[in-house]
Every structure is written in C-alpha cells, then in structure tokens.
C-alpha cells in the first residue's frame, strides 16, 4: 500500500496542509450526522469541505463527484474516500470511507434488532414514521442546493429534466441514462459552457504496476471473508450465499440504492425468499433514517436472511454476522474503485471531452435524485400506490383513500424547519422523530 500512498501525496499539490487528526474529526462528525441519503450527504460535504473550510476547490470537488457517479456503489461514500485519499493518501481514504459507513451500520444493526423484537410497538413505529418525514424535506432541500450549483446554462437543466422524464414515465434503466448522457457530453463537448478545468494534477507516476497492485490488494481484501465462509461453513450456507450475492450486486449497483431495489425485490424476495416485500420496504425506511448511505438497506436484508437460517449459530449471532458480511461486500469494492482509479482521474482533469461527459452526468444525477424524491414522497404519503402502463409509457397510480394526512402535515412542517428556518439536519431529525412518535402513539 505504500506505493499508492506516495502517489496520493504527490497528487496533494494544491491541497491545503491539514493534519490527519483535524481531518479525522471532520470525517467522524460527518459519519454521525450524514442523514438524508446521497443528496443530503453530498450537499453536507460540499458545505463542510468547500464552503466552510476551503479544503478543496469547487471544480475539484465536482470532478471527484462526477467520477464517483460513474462507479457502481454509493457515490457519497466514494466521494468521501476520494477526498480523504487526496488529502492524506490511503490512510486518509480508508478513514474517511470507513467512518462514513460504520456509524450508520452500527445504528442500522441496532434498529434491525429492534425491528425483529419490537417493530409492532406504536412508539417505535412512530419514531421511524417521524424520521421519514424529515428525510423527505432534507432530500428535497439538498436537490435544490446541488441543482443551483450544477445548472450553469439551459443545457444541464434540459438534461436533468429529460433524465427525470425517462426514469419516471418510461422506466429507463439508470445505467443507460447515465452512460447515454456521458457519451453525448464526450462527443459534443462544445455544447457545454465549461469553466477552465484548473490545474491538471499529475498522477505522481501512477503506473500500470501501481494500479495492478491496488487491484490485487483490494480484490483480496474484498473476497477473503467470503472465501473463509465458504471453506468453514460450506458454499451453500446462508452467510456464504450472502457474500457472493452482494459481491455480485456491488459490481452492478449503478444509480444508487433505489436502482438496485428491483433486483433485491426479485431475487431476495421472490426467488430466495429471504424476506417479504413488506420487510424490504421497512428496511428501506430504516436505511433512510440512519446516517450513512441509503444502500445500507442491504444490511437489513442480510440480517433477516441469516436470522431465519441461523444454524449453527444462535439467531442474534447469525443475524449480526449476516449484516456484517453483507455490509463488507457492499462497501469494500468502493475502496477498490477509488484507490485503483482516482490517481488516473486526477491526471485527466484538463481533458475537455471528459469534463463535458462528467458535466452531463452531473446533470443526470439531479434528475435521478428528483425522481427518487418523488418516488419516496409517493410511498410516504400514500398507503397504496403502483404503476399504470400503455406501451413504453408508464405513470404512478395512487389510491386516494390511502392518503396519509398526518404524514403530509409532518412533512410540511419539516420543510418549514429545513428550508424556511434552516435548522441543522440532526436537530430536524430528532424533532420530527419525537413528533412522529407522539402522533402515532396518541392516534
């Protein structure tokens, strides 16, 4: 790993000289307060690192974000890993990436235990209900802030709107929309009114050997626990199956957590029977209410799958191990993508075609986030919803009698706190959790 560290230290030309300890405090604070899914987390990182501390310039932040958007897996966690790597090499990337996940994963594990032991208690259900109304407001606010920075002309707006329409009304695949926008930007860079790319930082001699070394190290670290489970428990044991399943999913999870829900629903629910559709929806709700990536919904799936097939362990032990192997196989590939690819991306910042491709992808991300906000809002406000279709066209169908007025009122109040009074995220989440519990408990 030393070679990769030397590369990243050379890349630090143009980065402020911040001590590792000072950066670690910020990454730790971010890990415990990064509510709101990818949109809120990216907005929070921008505010903390670009606006307030000036640790990274705007153009470089967006360049890193665009690269992470291209990758499978959680882009917000990968962005934290990328910036940590820029500042302090491999140890900086590791600390930033792990701290972005660990607090949410630990809390998610606790919530999963609470779910299996007491999810029918009105007070517990009310807490989850209130937090979900806060998340909706936080995500909407984050989308507005990111769009304000990304939309420099009418073309990015048009791309975002087109992406939203394709996803919402034509069920277009996330990877196809992202790749299509990137190709269009690459072929027609003159259509984008790009600011100067800034300094193209050298990769510090990042060679094929350096890249191959990073690939070997991180592929080995990624798959070692799965191989150990296969040897000790057998290839058909539930923990081994979880390792292989979520390793495969991690390589194809373009578009964020919601993009992989269809595959999870089809395989984990319908084919493997690890959990029910209702439990899948509850897992998404839990993931939305914890700090860290929304893709932590996979941890809840692994938890319940191992809970129901615990042998030779007790149920709590098996469930905890299921959650652990699922989380590792979901997030470990992110370190592979960053440590192997980021050095080369830094040396390409001045490439106009690449810059245009990534700018187009940024616009698509705004459209994707908007679609996800609408999707989440419909499921929060209506007890029953589905899709109507006519040929390639589809549209959401709602059962008006299932409209949740309490959710609407709490969501509106959360919007006032977030967008009107500009309360901090943690404060809003705590207040809405208390209000949600009070509403559900009293009614």
Image (cartoon, grey):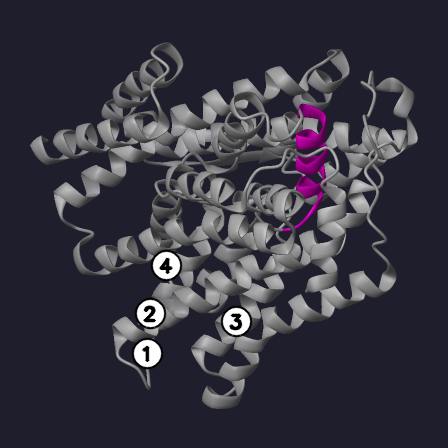
Tag 2 secondary structure: helix
Query: Magenta segment, which residues?
Result: 58-72
Q: Is residue 68 rendered magenta in the image?
A: yes
Tag in front: 4 or 3: 3
- Rendering coords of residue 360 (x, y %): 76, 28
Tag 1 secondary structure: loop
Ranked by sequence position, the earlier of labels 4 and 3 is: 3
Name the chief secondary structure element in magenta. helix
Disc 3 target residue: 243
Ranked by sequence position, the earlier of labels 1 and 3 is: 3
Q: Quadrant of residue 127?
A: top left
Q: Is residue 24 above or below residue 136?
A: below
Binning the other alpha carbons within 10 Å of mark 2 as few (below 14), some (14 to 19) or many (20 upward) gives many
Disc 1 target residue: 310
Disc 4 target residue: 276
Ranked by sequence position, the earlier of labels 1 and 2 is: 1
Disc 2 target residue: 319
Which quarter of the figure is the C terminus placed in? top left
Q: Quadrant of residue 248?
A: bottom right
Tag in front: 2 or 4: 2
């Amino acid at each position: 790993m030393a070679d990769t560290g030397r590369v990243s230290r050379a890349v630090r030309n143009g980065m402020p000289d911040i001590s590792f300890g000072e950066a670690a405090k910020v990454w730790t604070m971010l890990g415990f307060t990064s509510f709101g899914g990818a949109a809120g987390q990216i907005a929070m990182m921008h505010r903390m690192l670009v606006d307030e501390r000036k640790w990274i310039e705007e153009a470089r932040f967006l360049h890193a974000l665009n690269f992470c958007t291209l990758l499978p897996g959680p882009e917000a966690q990968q962005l934290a890993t990328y910036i940590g790597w820029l500042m302090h090499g491999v140890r900086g990337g590791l600390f930033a990436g792990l701290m972005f996940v660990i607090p949410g994963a630990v809390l998610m594990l606790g919530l999963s235990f609470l779910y299996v032991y007491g999810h029918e208690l009105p007070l517990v259900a009310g807490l989850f209900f209130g937090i979900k109304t806060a998340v909706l407001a936080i995500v909407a606010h984050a989308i507005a802030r990111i769009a304000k920075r990304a939309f420099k002309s009418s073309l990015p707006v048009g791309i975002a709107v087109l992406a939203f329409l394709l996803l919402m009304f034509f069920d277009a695949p996330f990877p196809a929309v992202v790749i299509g926008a990137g190709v269009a930007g690459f072929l027609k860079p003159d259509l984008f009114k790009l600011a100067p790319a800034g300094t193209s930082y050298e990769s510090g001699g990042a060679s094929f050997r350096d890249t191959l070394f990073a690939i070997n190290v991180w592929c080995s670290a990624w798959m070692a626990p799965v191989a150990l489970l296969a040897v000790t428990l057998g290839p058909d044991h539930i923990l081994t199956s979880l390792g292989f399943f979520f390793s495969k999913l991690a390589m194809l999870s373009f578009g964020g957590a919601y993009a992989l829900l269809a595959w999870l629903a089809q395989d984990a629910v319908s084919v493997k029977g690890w959990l029910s559709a209702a439990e899948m929806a509850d897992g998404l709700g839990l993931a939305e209410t914890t700090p860290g990536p929304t893709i932590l919904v996979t941890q809840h799936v692994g938890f319940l799958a191992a809970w129901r097939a615990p042998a030779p362990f007790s149920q709590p032990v098996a469930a905890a191990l299921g959650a652990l192997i699922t989380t590792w196989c979901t997030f470990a590939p992110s370190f592979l993508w960053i440590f192997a690819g980021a050095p080369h991306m830094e040396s390409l910042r001045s490439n106009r075609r690449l810059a245009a491709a990534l700018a187009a992808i940024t616009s698509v991300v705004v459209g994707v986030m908007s679609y996800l906000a609408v999707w989440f809002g419909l499921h929060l406000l209506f007890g029953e919803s589905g899709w109507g279709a006519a040929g390639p066209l589809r549209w959401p169908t709602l059962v008006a009698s299932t409209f949740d007025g309490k959710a609407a009122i709490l969501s509106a109040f959360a919007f006032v706190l977030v967008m009107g009074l500009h309360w901090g995220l943690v404060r809003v989440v705590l207040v809405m959790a208390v209000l949600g519990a009070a509403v559900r408990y009293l009614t």
